């Protein structure tokens, strides 16, 4: 029993998913349990659902982020990566771990993605990629952002870990970037317990990611010509043990893929419930107290987004105590707890936030609250009563 009247999350995994694992494990001949045919089957099913050609299942969304940034460093060299301060920590650490330079650009209150003018100003000849986060199911893309990438020849990487099924102009996000990253952590739109996916239409990037998923081993590549050219360039090495660059083991197991295969067919109908819940929520939230002018076209949220209009610490504390009193679980600061530039390891790097007014407001005066399939209407009504009161 959850102690909260309205908990932050509800595990997506149901009896049917568990039964699919039991069935898989009960096969007369014990199946291969590490990365194998079920992983490939899940990758293909995911590609059919999303619409991308190449899909790589990994053991978390954070691994998808890190692998993507490592592969970019391998292909393009290290450079500047533009990131929002409103994101998950792995979007920051992946950039640093791969040897790139972080460039933070403030967000906007309409789609919680980059402030477009500040984004333009942050581009330099050394910008390798814009690493966008679609925050809590809100589409972060605009035509202008895509134009900026195209005109400046900069790659767009989409972090869709919080936004499976969100669309831009009718097409699922995760299809617009050079690559996109997803998480299947237990409370996200769908779950594989832990897990993540990298999706792309670029063959070279995919092949590099295949190697980097398994310690950097080139024998994991499926393109015979790419594999052969590396073997030819390293005649002194055993072709079975050529490591492209120092890397990690990001592989998942067959069990996680079996759960993914059972979860995926249910994703669209569960998303529909989340969309309906969010519409009820946002259209009844008091616009005098809260910022409700969020662009909800194509949204698909697993959380309700609450942003106070006033910058009042007193109002914030009152609101939090009311939520607590009513058993409503919440997290302040939206994705990742607000301004990532304020984390302890950046204390001496970033001290002046005057160019970051929006994330500073979000840091102190915003929350997310659980929105999941099966959430009872009366709980949404109660939540609105508490917030609007
Ligand atoms: C935007 C974003 N990126 C990456 C991640 C990391 O995903 P995981 O928890 O599967 O490592 C998360 C996790 O919640 C996230 O919200």
Image (spheres, helix red, strand yellow):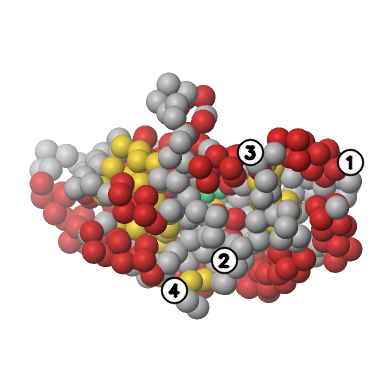
| Secondary-structure class at tag 2 | loop
- Residue 76 shows up from this direction: yes
The image quarter containing residue 198 is bottom left
Name the residue: 35% across, 46% down: 82
- Residue 383 shows up from this direction: no
Of mark 2 and mark 3, the one earlier in the sequence is 2
The image quarter containing residue 94 is top left
Question: Is there a contact, CB below 8 Å, between mark 1 and mark 2?
Answer: no
Residue under label 1, please give it: 325
Task: Say whether residue 125 is left or right of residue 369.
Answer: left
Of mark 4 and mark 2, the one earlier in the sequence is 4
Numbered mark located on residue 197 in the image: none
3D distance between C-alphas at marks 3 and 1: 20 Å
Q: Nearer the viewer, residue 125 or 249?
A: 125
3D distance between C-alphas at marks 3 and 4: 38 Å
Q: Position of residue 347 (x, y in %)?
A: 47, 23
Question: Is there a contact, CB below 8 Å, between mark 3 and mark 4?
Answer: no
Q: Position of residue 171 (x, y in %)?
A: 47, 75
Of mark 3 and mark 4, the one earlier in the sequence is 4
Label 1 Cα neighbours within 10 Å, binned few <14 / some 14-19 / many ≥20: few
Of mark 3 and mark 1, the one earlier in the sequence is 1
Of mark 1 and mark 2, the one earlier in the sequence is 2
Residue under label 2, please give it: 295
Q: Is mark 1 within 8 Å of ligand 1?
A: no
Q: Nearer the viewer, residue 335 or 291?
A: 291
Numbered mark located on residue 364 in the image: 3
Name the residue: 16% across, 39% down: 237
Q: Position of residue 380 (x, y in %)?
A: 82, 61
* Figure check: 297 above or below 37: below
| Secondary-structure class at tag 1 | helix
Numbered mark located on residue 51 in the image: 4
Q: Nearer the viewer, residue 38 or 276?
A: 276
């Amino acid at each position: 029993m959850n102690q909260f009247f309205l908990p932050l999350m509800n595990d997506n995994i149901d009896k049917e998913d568990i039964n699919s694992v039991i069935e898989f494990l009960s096969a007369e001949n014990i199946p291969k349990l590490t990365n194998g045919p079920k992983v490939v089957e899940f990758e293909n099913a995911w590609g059919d659902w999303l619409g991308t050609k190449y899909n790589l299942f990994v053991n978390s969304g954070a691994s998808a982020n890190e692998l993507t940034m490592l592969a970019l460093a391998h292909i393009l060299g290290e450079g500047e990566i533009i990131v929002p301060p409103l994101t998950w920590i792995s979007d920051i650490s992946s950039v640093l771990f791969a040897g790139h330079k972080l460039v933070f650009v403030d967000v906007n209150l309409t789609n919680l993605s980059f402030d477009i003018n500040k984004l333009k100003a942050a581009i330099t000849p050394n910008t390798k990629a814009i690493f966008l986060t679609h925050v809590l199911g809100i589409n972060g893309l605009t035509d202008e952002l895509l134009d900026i990438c195209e005109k400046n020849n900069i790659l767009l990487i989409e972090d869709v870990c919080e936004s499976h099924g969100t669309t831009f102009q009718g097409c699922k996000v995760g299809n617009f970037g050079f690559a996109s990253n997803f998480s299947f952590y237990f409370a996200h739109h769908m779950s594989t317990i832990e897990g993540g996916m990298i999706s792309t239409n670029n063959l070279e990037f995919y092949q590099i990611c295949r190697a980097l998923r398994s310690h950097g081993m080139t024998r994991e590549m499926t393109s015979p010509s790419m594999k052969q050219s590396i073997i030819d360039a390293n005649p002194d090495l055993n072709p079975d043990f050529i490591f492209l660059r120092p890397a990690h083991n990001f592989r998942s197991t067959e069990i996680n893929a079996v759960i993914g295969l059972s979860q995926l067919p249910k994703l669209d109908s569960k998303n529909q419930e989340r969309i309906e819940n969010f519409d009820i929520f946002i259209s009844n939230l008091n616009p005098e107290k809260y910022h409700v002018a969020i662009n909800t076209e194509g949204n698909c949220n697993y959380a309700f987004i609450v942003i106070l209009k006033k910058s009042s610490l007193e109002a914030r504390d009152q609101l939090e105590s009311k939520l607590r009193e009513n058993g409503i679980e919440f997290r302040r600061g939206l994705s990742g707890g607000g301004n990532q530039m304020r984390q302890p390891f950046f204390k001496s790097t970033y001290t002046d936030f005057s160019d970051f007014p929006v994330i500073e407001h979000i840091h102190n005066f915003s929350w997310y609250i659980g929105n999941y399939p099966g959430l009872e209407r009366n709980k949404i009504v109660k939540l609105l009563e508490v917030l609007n009161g």
